[in-house]
């Protein structure tokens, strides 16, 4: 798919369809749905107040956190795959981007969603799957050394667009760079806590 994203020639109506499909799939708040279904209440009331997998892990339920991670990732992958099949790789990239935005700013939750790490990975899986291995390697190394999920994710999201650009995937690099910048903004509180040394470590309950 990367090699096909060399020129952006998608028609505006199809680009809009891809954006809508991506946003609607991305805005499904799986972390909130799963924790409520499990009788754990509103995950937004603990830890960082986030609906993502890291905060779900603070409930102490590892299986639920894993399920949230997978579902938040695959909703973006599915959006990218569907639109790539229907209208080509450009539509897939747009759908993945808007699935990411839907996760961060879901209309159903007053535009207050997650921070997008899992959905970022899901988009990457949908449009540049080999680079998921790069992301995973960086995240695991940083998480093992420092025990901060946010730091591991932020480092990986800094490296991925650069790696894509180095390997000649400029268009995909641009999409992922946009997502990285937005996710860094969403992580601004985490960045402040990392600097002050008050960020919660992996496995800590909220």
Image (spheres, rainbow, N blue to C red):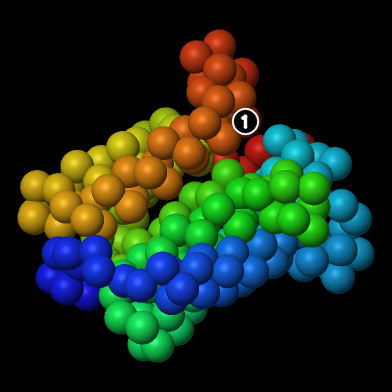
Rendered image quadrant of residue 129: bottom left
Q: Quadrant of the C terminus?
A: top right
Q: Position of residue 39 (x, y in %)?
A: 91, 64
Q: Which residue is mark 1?
A: 200
Q: Position of residue 113 (x, y in %)?
A: 69, 48
Q: Is residue 140 visible?
A: yes
Q: Is residue 93 left or right of residue 25?
A: left
Front-most of residues 148 and 128: 128
Name the residue: 57% across, 35% down: 186
Q: Position of residue 25 (x, y in %)?
A: 61, 71
Name the residue: 35% across, 72% down: 11
Rendered image quadrant of residue 49: top right
Q: Is residue 114 left or right of residue 131?
A: right
Front-most of residues 97 and 47: 97
Front-most of residues 17 and 77: 17
Q: Quadrant of the N terminus?
A: bottom left
């Amino acid at each position: 798919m990367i090699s096909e994203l060399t020129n952006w020639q998608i028609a505006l109506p199809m680009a809009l369809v891809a954006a809508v499909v991506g946003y609607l799939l991305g805005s499904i708040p799986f972390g909130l749905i799963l924790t409520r279904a499990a009788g754990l209440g509103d995950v937004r009331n603990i830890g960082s107040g986030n609906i993502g997998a890291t905060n779900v892990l603070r409930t102490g339920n590892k299986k639920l956190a894993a399920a949230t991670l997978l579902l938040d990732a695959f909703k973006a992958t599915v959006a990218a795959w569907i639109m790539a099949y229907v209208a080509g790789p450009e539509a897939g990239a747009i759908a993945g981007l808007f699935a990411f935005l839907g996760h961060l700013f879901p209309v159903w939750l007053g535009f207050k969603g997650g921070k997008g790490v899992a959905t970022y990975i899901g988009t990457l899986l949908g449009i540049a799957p080999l680079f998921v291995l790069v992301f995973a390697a960086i995240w695991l190394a940083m998480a093992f050394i420092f025990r901060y999920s946010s730091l591991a994710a932020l480092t990986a999201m800094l490296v991925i667009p650069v790696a894509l650009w180095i390997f000649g995937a400029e268009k995909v690099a641009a999409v992922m760079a946009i997502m990285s910048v937005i996710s860094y903004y969403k992580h601004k509180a985490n960045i402040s806590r990392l600097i002050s040394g008050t960020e919660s470590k992996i496995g800590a309950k909220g």
